[in-house]
Image: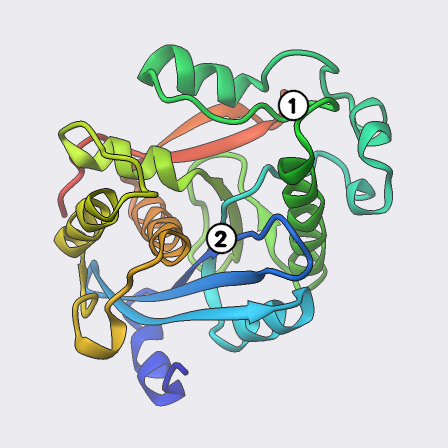
Amino acid sequence: MLEMSYLQRSVSFGGAFVGVDVPGSETKPFFVAVLISTEEKAHLISVEQLIGLERAIDFILQNKPCAIAIDAPQPLCSRAHELQFEEFFKACGWARNGLRECERELIQRFKIRCFPTTPTTFASFRRLILIGWRLYAKLISHGYRIAKGKRRGKLERWLIEVYPHATFVMLAGSKLHPKAKAIGRAQRLAILERYISGILRPQRITRCADELDAIAAALTAFLWWHGKCIILGSPKKGGCLVIPKAHNLM
């Protein structure tokens, strides 16, 4: 659990950044990583596994993040979490076929493939999207806003959509092994270690892919806050996806 006195000291330097790996099932945990920023350096404070949306929300808000990076597609209308999955695309004006603009850019510009956000996407990703929409809605009700590009005021609290695999690819500098393999997870941990202090302390060593994805999401929020990211897509065409600039060492 994050020490609040440590967090309070960090706020004057830049605040906390949270990354959320959204589960594809109500019975699986959210993985939530917390970084703090001191003099433009990132420090890992905590990675938690939290079953249930309310527990995840409580933990996120307790840490008072200035930016939250969510590994799930953002909604384009306020009622998204109340609609049936297929109804959402018609109600919010999303294309019923093909990729979102940000997904298309990710593939065409950077050769990074991703799951398409469409009415016919496969079941487990559909469940993840629905859980993600409820997460966005809850955080918006607590004063957070979905960012439409670069960061604006320091006093604002922002939500960004991220894709941890793209974060790792952009920062890797070499081909990544699959994260399902131990060598792939070790490779991703080494990437994170270049940007984040405290990640290899004994009590904070991460082994599972979901933990690594949550930390990569938080790191993307940190880099975005400092103007070191690329914004793909547009608010009116499926939302914006945030990825780091390539080999973006601080």
Label 1, residues with CA under 10 Å away: few <14, some 14-19, many ≥20: few
Viewer-side label of 2, 1? 2
Residue 80 sits in quarter: top right
Q: Is residue 250 left or right of residue 124?
A: left
Q: Is residue 51 left or right of residue 217?
A: right
Residue lying furthest front: 181
- Where is 133 relative to 86, above or below? below
Residue 54 sits in quarter: bottom right
Identify which residue is drawn at 42% across, 38% down: 150
Query: How many numbered circles are shown?
Result: 2
- Where is 213 relative to 247, above or below? below
| Percent x, y of residue 75 | 68, 38
Q: Is residue 203 left or right of residue 19?
A: left
| Percent x, y of residue 126 | 69, 36
Tell me the amino acid under the disc marked 2. Answer: Asp
Identify which residue is drawn at 68% across, 23% down: 118
Tell me the amino acid under the disc marked 1. Answer: Lys
Q: Residue 189 carries which label?
A: none
Helix, strand or loop for disc 2: strand
Helix, strand or loop for disc 1: loop
Q: In which quarter of the image is the N terminus?
A: bottom left
Closest to the observer, 98 or 155: 98
- Residue at the disc numbered 2: 21
- Residue at the disc numbered 1: 236
| Percent x, y of residue 48 | 44, 71
Q: Which of marks 2 and 1 is nearer the N terminus?
A: 2
Identify which residue is drawn at 63% across, 12% down: 98
Q: Is residue 95 left or right of residue 65?
A: right
| Residue contact at pointers 2 and 1, CB within 8 angstroms | no
Label 2, residues with CA under 10 Å away: few <14, some 14-19, many ≥20: many
- What's the colour scheme? rainbow
Q: Can residue 242 be seen in this view?
A: yes
